[in-house]
Image (cartoon, rainbow, N blue to C red):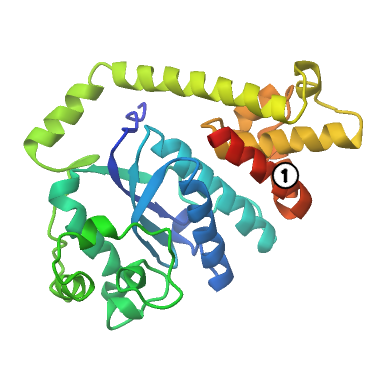
């Protein structure tokens, strides 16, 4: 049976969850957790995502994301694929880290933003890892309270705007459901909201026109960025598509092209590999990681990313 198409909606609020393969741990130490959060922070910019809340548990993650563009799948695939590569290399293993597709629920923002942020922040308390949610280091709760060493990239203003006393009132709001099993909402399928909200979403996606239009827009934008990046790297089409490039500079330019395209477009590793003349997806990922590890190449590539996204 074919899988239902995932909802990718510009301006959508999504509760994203992902579990470890066979419910195995996806974080073995704090270095793993920091590596995952670094990737969330890194990719949210190019994909124009706001992170309203997050929580990293040992074998699963929660993310509350708002997308400016219809690119949730591209963002999540980039995030989880990049972390998988990191995790397997660090721990000298192969295979899947995550359990299949990530799960995403489109949320009616005005009705459920507060409840979902509270639900996410209470996960460590429910799991009996801490007594109070702000004691848990690996969630965005500490960002909401303005505690030392928190992430500046977490968007707290939309939630805190509901409270006149801001931080302390939000803390009291979260405390209000401590010890309560009912999360305060019921999900139905891949949408969470009022009947009117769900009907509106279903109408948009019923005939597939929305997805086709968004896919065409993304392909057009990706093609424009490919042309711009290759021009900035001084690459002609022949050099770009020569699978076994000769010369150190040519090889570096192709590696940087893959690195930049993965951070500025919705193209997958496999799609970039075809642009590069048939390089495998694993080969593209490996080249991009090499660029990330070499400061001079990474700095040059990051400058190109800023120009491309301008």
**Is residue 52 shown above or below 260?**
below
Specify the quadrant that holds the N terminus: top left
Q: Which residue occupies 67% across, 62% down?
A: 90
**Closest to the observer, 98 or 46:** 46
Q: Residue furthest right?
A: 247
Residue 297 position within the rendered picture, expressed as x and y whole percent measured from the top left: 76, 46
How crowded pointer 1 is (Cα within 10 Å; few <14, some 14-19, many 20+) is rated as: few
Could you say whether the residue bearing mark 1 is in a helix, strand or loop? Answer: helix
Q: Which residue occupies 76% across, 20% down?
A: 241
**Closest to the observer, 1 or 88:** 88
Q: Is residue 195 left or right of residue 259?
A: left
Residue 301 position within the rendered picture, expressed as x and y whole percent measured from the top left: 69, 42
Residue 199 position within the rendered picture, expressed as x and y whole percent measured from the top left: 12, 29
Where residue 53 sits, quadrant-wise, is: bottom left
Q: Residue furthest left?
A: 195
Residue 100 position within the rendered picture, expressed as x and y whole percent measured from the top left: 45, 44
**Dot 1 corresponds to which residue?**
300
- Is residue 114 something that shows in the picture? yes
Q: Is residue 120 left or right of residue 291?
A: left
Q: Which residue occupies 50% across, 23% down?
A: 221
Q: Is residue 77 left or right of residue 62?
A: right
Q: Which residue occupies 22% across, 59% down?
A: 159
**Closest to the observer, 250 or 176:** 250
Give the number of callouts. 1
- Is residue 29 something that shows in the picture? no
């Amino acid at each position: 049976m074919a899988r239902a198409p995932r909802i990718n909606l510009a301006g959508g609020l999504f509760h994203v969850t992902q579990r470890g393969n066979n419910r195995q741990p996806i974080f073995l130490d704090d270095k793993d957790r920091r590596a995952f959060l670094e990737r969330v922070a890194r990719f949210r910019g190019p994909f124009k995502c706001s992170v309203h809340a997050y929580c990293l548990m040992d074998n699963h993650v929660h993310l509350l994301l708002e997308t400016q563009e219809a690119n949730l799948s591209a963002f999540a695939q980039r995030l989880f694929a990049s972390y998988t590569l990191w995790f397997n290399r660090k721990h000298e293993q192969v295979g899947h880290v995550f359990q299949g597709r990530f799960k995403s629920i489109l949320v009616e923002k005005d009705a459920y933003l507060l409840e979902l942020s509270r639900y996410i922040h209470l996960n460590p308390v429910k799991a009996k890892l801490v007594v109070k949610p702000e004691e848990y280091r690996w969630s965005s709760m500490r960002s909401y309270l303005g505690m030392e060493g928190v992430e500046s990239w977490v968007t707290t203003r939309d939630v805190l705007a509901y409270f006149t006393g801001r931080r302390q009132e939000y803390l009291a709001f979260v405390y209000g459901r401590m010890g309560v099993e009912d999360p305060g909402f019921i999900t139905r399928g891949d949408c969470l909201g009022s009947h009117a909200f769900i009907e509106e979403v279903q109408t948009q996606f019923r005939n597939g026109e929305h997805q086709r239009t968004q896919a065409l827009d993304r392909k057009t934008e990706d093609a424009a960025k490919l042309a711009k990046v290759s021009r900035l790297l001084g690459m002609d089409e022949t050099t770009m598509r020569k699978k076994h490039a000769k010369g150190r500079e040519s090889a570096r330019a192709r590696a940087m092209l893959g690195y930049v395209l993965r951070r500025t477009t919705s193209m997958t590793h496999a799609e970039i590999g075809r642009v590069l003349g048939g390089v495998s997806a694993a080969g593209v990922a490996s080249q991009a990681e090499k660029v990330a590890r070499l400061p001079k190449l990474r700095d040059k590539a990051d400058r190109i990313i800023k120009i491309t996204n301008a």
